[in-house]
Image (cartoon, rainbow, N blue to C red):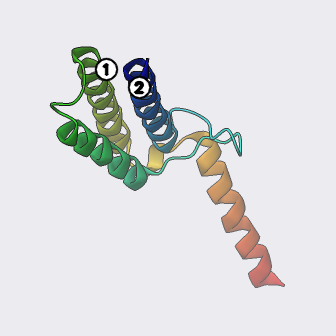
Amino acid sequence: MNEDKNKQLFLSLIYSFQMQTMMQLGKLANPMSGKIERELEGAQVTIDMLDMLKEKSANNISDDEKRFLEQVIADLKLNFVEEKAKGPSEAPPEEIEEKNDTAEEKKEEVKD
């Protein structure tokens, strides 16, 4: 039973990192704010952590766990490259609107 529990916990940990990275890539909305935000540096760090976890757990996980981890890492890396290629000008619409609102607020402060 303990082995099954640990397997489920390990898969949940990987899934949690995957969802966090997808939010950082702007692929999913942040559940706290409801906004889509891109933070590519954070996404890179999270992907690096998954790579480290893969390396450190290499001989301690089942074949299923290894395949799942490798698939998640490969998928996240492809999405990262896609988002990085977009550049800052193709940020999600909500992020662009938020930056524009902030710029307008600063202009108003300068006028006053």
Q: Height in image: 32 above or below 27?
A: below
Disc 2 residue crowd, few under 14, some 14–19, many 20+, Cα 10 Å: some
Q: How crowded is mark 1: few (under 14 residues within 10 Å), some or many (20 or more)?
A: some
Left-right relation of 73 to 8: left
Residue occupied by mark 1:
68
**The N terminus: image quadrant:** top left
- Residue 2 rendering spot, x and y as whole percentages: 42, 23
* Lateral position of residue 100 relative to residue 40, left or right: right
Coordinates of residue 64 in the picture (x, y in percent): 28, 15
Q: Nearer the viewer, mark 1 or mark 2?
A: 2
| Residue name at image x 56 percent, y 33 percent | 28
Q: Which residue is drawn at 39% across and 47% down?
A: 43
Q: Can you give x and y, in whole percent of width and height, for residue 80 in the image?
A: 34, 38
Q: Which of marks 1 and 2 is nearer the N terminus?
A: 2
Residue 104 sits in which quadrant? Answer: bottom right
Q: Give the side of residue 96 with respect to residue 32, left or right.
A: left
Residue flagged by tag 2: what amino acid is it? Leu
Judged from the image, the secondary structure of the residue bearing numbered disc 1 is helix
Quadrant assignment for the C terminus: bottom right
Q: Nearer the viewer, residue 27 or 74?
A: 74
Disc 1 to disc 2: CB gap under 8 Å: yes
In the rendered structure, find residue 11 and report the number of the disc placed on it.
2
Residue 77 image label: none
- Seen at 15% across and 30% down, the residue is 59
Quarter-of-image position of residue 93: top right
